[in-house]
Amino acid sequence: MRDFAEKLDAAGELVTVSEPVKTELEIAALADLEMKKPGGGRALLFTKPVLPDGSVSAFPVLINAFGSERRMALALNVGKVNEVAGQLAGLLKAKPPQNFGEAWELLKQGIGALHAKPRTVSVGACKDVIIKTDADGDGLNLLPILKCWPADGGAFVTLPNVHTQDPDTGLRNIGMYRMQVFDRRTTGMHWQLHKVGARHGQRYRERGERMPVSVCLGGDPALTFSATAPLPDGLDEIMLAGYLRKKSVPLVKCETNELLVPADSDFVIEGYVAPGELRDEGPFGDHTGFYTPVDRYPVFHVTCITHRKDAVYPATIVGKPPMEDFYLGDASVRIFLPVIKMNFPEIVDIALPAEGVFHNLVIVSVNKQYPYQAFKIMNGLWGMGQMMFAKIIVVVDADVDVHNTGEVLFRVCANIDPQRDTLFTKGPCDSLDHAQSLPNIGSHAGIDATRKLAGEGYTRTWPEPCAHPAELVGKMRQLLDSHR
């Protein structure tokens, strides 16, 4: 993360705050102001974060590092995020290369996944310093973990890469689940019902075994992005990170469990989750813009903390949008659009506006060819992974810019008969959605704002939109510019 901070600084994307600033509320409040600026403001590096005991942490805090389109491109080492979108569909069709022969075949196909498979190493910078937590020693109290909002239940680790493994298949998963600090050796583990980490935990509970868990902070920014990406179940996030950077990710074994973690991580927090152990977690000011209430979640026991000698602590704050997480989500949408088009070739573009906090509002443009095609798209998207959480899906015609919310609202208001063009269905909902009557389940709505066809019961002639010829508009624009 220190290398990334220097890269952001060189690009004019970083503000260094050298004054002492408290980890309790102050850093988060300053970051919230910066994130609300047009385009996401700049990243912030706090060199003197003040811990709750009044001491200054040995570790700087980097926040809002992913909070703009440009910083997301820098994180992925590309000029524009869209540069990787056209290649990812091929990667998802393929399996990770198991040997040089398979890698060469993928390379010949133009996929460029030679470096997708990680490699195991014996040492890593993440082990420059090793702290074994015990009854009298230090632990999480050493880290500048933020309390973000006044009514939060405590300080939360907000940008963790949580490594778990399926006990049956050995498949790895990396998720991003907030972690409330209970004391220097325990935290909550907020993996929701529908997350892969929760599924792994369920299997360990059924087996009556402790679940090894390791939490990585920092390291290559591509790893943090991969932990947030809505990958198809079973696809390795480490493989995605290696593919994005065209560089094999080195993995090193943890000190107190058998999990392999990225060797260049800034911090690794090792530990376990005991079967059946739950504890009250929350409240937490969440990306919905509201506090999520207290609920029961597994407890993570810390057995060891390792870190780089030059470690930088990465953090974020979520809340009423726009926030840093919008840009992580937007990058996922753009990168994974080719994957969605593999299943729905009529889709032109997709947008998840910031106001919808990811999946509350999904806007889709399509090349419409037959009746009820919009409803087919709605139902199909609700069946795709995390799209099952989409509360409202709006489908518009191909000529609509889905990123222009004003244009979308114009088409919705102009093109729909509410009774004819609205679809309601039931299904799983986001655990953080406070509007549903029951947790985790509720209703979803689809709005067909496309032009209507005769096969949809529309017996009149659909009108053409008012527009001047492009040649005339160009001529008049030149005339207008000459009078400025």
Image (cartoon, grey):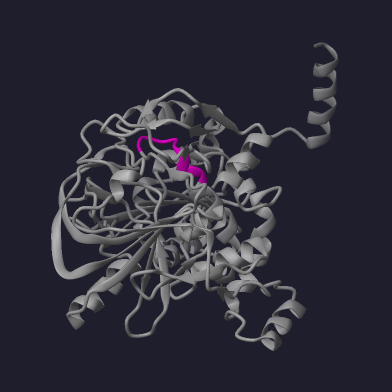
266 or 285, nearer to the observer: 266
Residue at point 29%, 60% (across, down): 191
Quadrant where the image shows the C terminus? top right
The foreground one among 141 and 103 is: 141
Give x and y (percent) for residue 394: 45, 50
Give the quadrant of residue 407.
Answer: top right
What residue is drawn where x is 32% and y is 51%?
A: 178
Question: In x, y percent, where is residue 293?
Answer: 18, 45
Residue nearest the observer in this picture, 66 or 93: 66
Q: Nearer the viewer, residue 163 or 348?
A: 163
Does 215 sit above or below residue 79?
Answer: below
Instruction: Report the magenta residues as a range.
Output: 319-327
> In the drawing, does residue 363 fall left or right of residue 146?
right
Is residue 165 visible in the rendered image? The answer is yes
**Residue 208 painted magenta:** no
Asked which quadrant contains residue 276, the reply is bottom left
| Relative to 366, residue 385 above or below | below
Position in image of residue 391 (x %, y %): 34, 52
In the image, is 16 to the left or to the right of 113?
left
Furthest residue in direction front, as rendered: 136
